C-alpha cells in the first residue's frame, strides 16, 4: 500500500476503497486488512448516511499505525471552523497526509430538511485552511514540530460539459490549494469520456490528479437506490438493463465494474479509481481480481 499521493503520480491506475469508522476496532481492522493488499489507500468516511459511526480521525490513525495509508474525509456540514481546523491539526500531528475536503449535503430526515447542519465555512475556506497549515513557515505557528505533507483533495462533478466550459469552480479550488480531485459516482463511460476531453483541454490535469468513483452494482434495485439516495450518481440505463437480463446479477455487477476499471486505466487524464462498496471488502477484492489490474495478494 503506497498511499494515494504516490499512486496517482505513478504510471498505473491508482486504486482506493472506503471504510466507515466503527466503535469496534477489531472488526474495523479486520475489514481494513482485507483491503490492504488490493488498494493503494483506504478512504475513511465521515458520518456516512448521516450516522455517527465513530471518529474518522481516530480510525485514520489506527490504519496508519497498522502500516496502512488512510485518506481522511472532512466536511463542512457537521462542524464549525474551529472544530475543523482542530481536526486538521490533529491530522497533521498524527502524520495523516491525504485529505478529501468537501462541503457535503444538508441533513435530511424524510422529506424535511433538518436545521442542525453547520456550514460555518465552505469547502474552499476549508481547503485554504489546510493549505495554510501545510505551508506554514515556521510550522510552530500552529504548534507543530514539523509541517504536514498534506495532499489536499476536493470534489469534482462529471457532467455534459460543452466546448465553451470555463471550469471556474475547479480553478478556484486549485488556487486555494487542491492537488487532487474525486468525482461523484460515475458509471456513465460515454459522458465521462466527453467530460475528460474538456478536463484535459482545460489543462486541469497539469495541476491536479483526478480519481473517478465507481461501484459494483449488484441488482436493478441497487441501481434505483443509488440513483435516489446518492446525489449526482450517474448510472446509465444500459447497466440496469444488463443487470435485469443477467442470470447472475451479482456476478454481472462485478464484471461491469471490472470493465470500468479497464476503461479508466486507458482514459487520458484519469489517475485513479475509487471503488465504493461500504462494509464489503470482499466485493472490492472481487472487482479488482476480475479486472486483472492487480495480482491477488500482491
Image: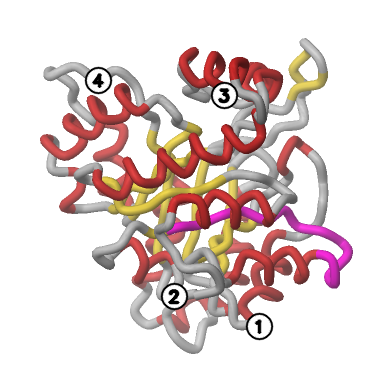
Q: Residue at 53% of width from left, 47% of height from top?
A: 275
User: In the rendered structure, are the residues bearing label 3 and label 2 in contact, judged by CB atoms less than 8 Å apart?
Assistant: no
> Viewed as shown, does residue 293 lie left or right of 68?
left
Residue 108 occupies which quadrant of the picture? top right
Circle 2 Cα neighbour tier, 10 Å, few/some/many (<14 / 14–19 / ≥20): few
Image spot of residue 195 (x, y percent): 26, 28
Q: Which residue is mark 4?
A: 161
Q: Residue at 18% of width from left, 21% of height from top?
A: 165
Label at residue 65: 1
- Rounded to the nearest angstrom, the CA distance separating label 4 from label 2 is 33 Å
User: In the rendered structure, are the residues bearing label 1 and label 4 in contact, judged by CB atoms less than 8 Å apart?
Assistant: no
Inspect this view and state whether residue 105 appears: yes
Chain-order first, disc 3 or disc 4: 4
Question: Regarding mark 2 in the picture, which secondary structure is present there?
Answer: loop
Image spot of residue 256 (x, y percent): 49, 35
Image spot of residue 77 (x, y percent): 64, 38
- Rounded to the nearest angstrom, the CA distance separating label 1 from label 4 is 42 Å
Q: Residue at 66% of width from left, 82% of height from top?
A: 66
User: In the rendered structure, are the residues bearing label 3 and label 1 in contact, judged by CB atoms less than 8 Å apart?
Assistant: no
Question: Regarding mark 3 in the picture, which secondary structure is present there?
Answer: loop
- Rounded to the nearest angstrom, the CA distance separating label 3 from label 4 is 18 Å
Circle 4 Cα neighbour tier, 10 Å, few/some/many (<14 / 14–19 / ≥20): some
Q: Which residues are magenta?
A: 15-27
- Above or below for 49 versus 112: below
Label at residue 231: 3
- Above or below for 237 versus 175: above
- Above or below for 178 versus 243: below
Chain-order first, disc 4 or disc 2: 2
- Residue farthest to the right? 24
- Mark nearest the camera among 4 and 2 is 2
Chain-order first, disc 3 or disc 2: 2
Q: Which residue is mark 2?
A: 2
Amino acid at each position: 500500500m503506497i498511499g494515494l499521493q504516490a499512486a496517482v503520480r505513478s504510471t498505473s491506475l491508482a486504486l482506493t476503497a472506503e471504510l466507515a469508522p466503527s466503535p469496534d476496532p477489531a472488526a474495523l481492522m479486520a475489514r481494513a486488512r482485507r483491503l490492504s493488499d488490493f488498494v493503494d489507500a483506504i478512504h475513511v468516511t465521515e458520518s456516512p448516511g448521516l450516522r455517527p459511526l465513530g471518529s474518522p480521525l481516530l480510525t485514520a490513525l489506527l490504519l496508519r499505525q497498522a502500516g496502512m495509508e488512510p485518506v481522511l474525509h472532512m466536511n463542512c456540514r457537521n462542524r464549525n471552523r474551529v472544530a475543523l481546523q482542530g481536526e486538521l491539526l490533529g491530522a497533521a500531528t498524527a502524520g495523516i497526509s491525504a485529505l478529501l475536503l468537501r462541503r457535503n449535503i444538508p441533513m435530511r430526515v424524510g422529506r424535511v430538511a433538518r436545521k442542525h447542519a453547520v456550514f460555518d465555512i465552505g469547502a474552499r475556506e476549508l481547503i485554504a485552511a489546510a493549505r495554510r497549515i501545510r505551508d506554514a513557515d515556521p510550522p510552530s505557528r500552529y504548534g507543530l514540530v514539523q509541517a504536514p505533507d498534506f495532499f489536499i483533495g476536493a470534489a469534482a462533478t462529471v457532467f455534459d460539459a460543452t466546448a465553451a466550459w470555463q471550469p471556474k469552480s475547479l480553478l478556484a479550488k486549485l488556487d486555494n490549494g487542491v492537488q487532487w480531485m474525486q468525482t461523484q459516482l460515475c458509471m456513465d463511460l460515454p459522458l465521462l469520456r466527453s467530460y475528460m476531453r474538456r478536463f484535459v483541454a482545460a489543462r486541469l490535469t497539469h495541476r491536479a490528479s483526478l480519481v473517478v468513483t465507481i461501484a459494483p452494482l449488484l441488482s436493478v434495485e441497487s441501481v434505483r437506490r443509488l440513483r435516489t439516495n446518492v446525489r449526482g450518481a450517474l448510472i446509465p440505463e444500459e447497466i440496469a438493463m444488463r443487470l435485469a437480463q443477467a442470470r447472475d446479477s451479482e456476478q454481472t455487477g462485478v464484471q461491469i465494474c471490472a470493465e470500468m476499471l479497464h476503461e479508466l486505466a486507458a482514459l487520458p487524464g484519469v489517475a485513479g479509481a475509487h471503488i465504493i462498496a461500504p462494509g464489503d471488502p470482499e466485493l472490492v477484492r472481487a472487482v479488482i481480481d476480475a479486472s486483472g489490474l492487480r495480482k491477488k495478494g500482491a
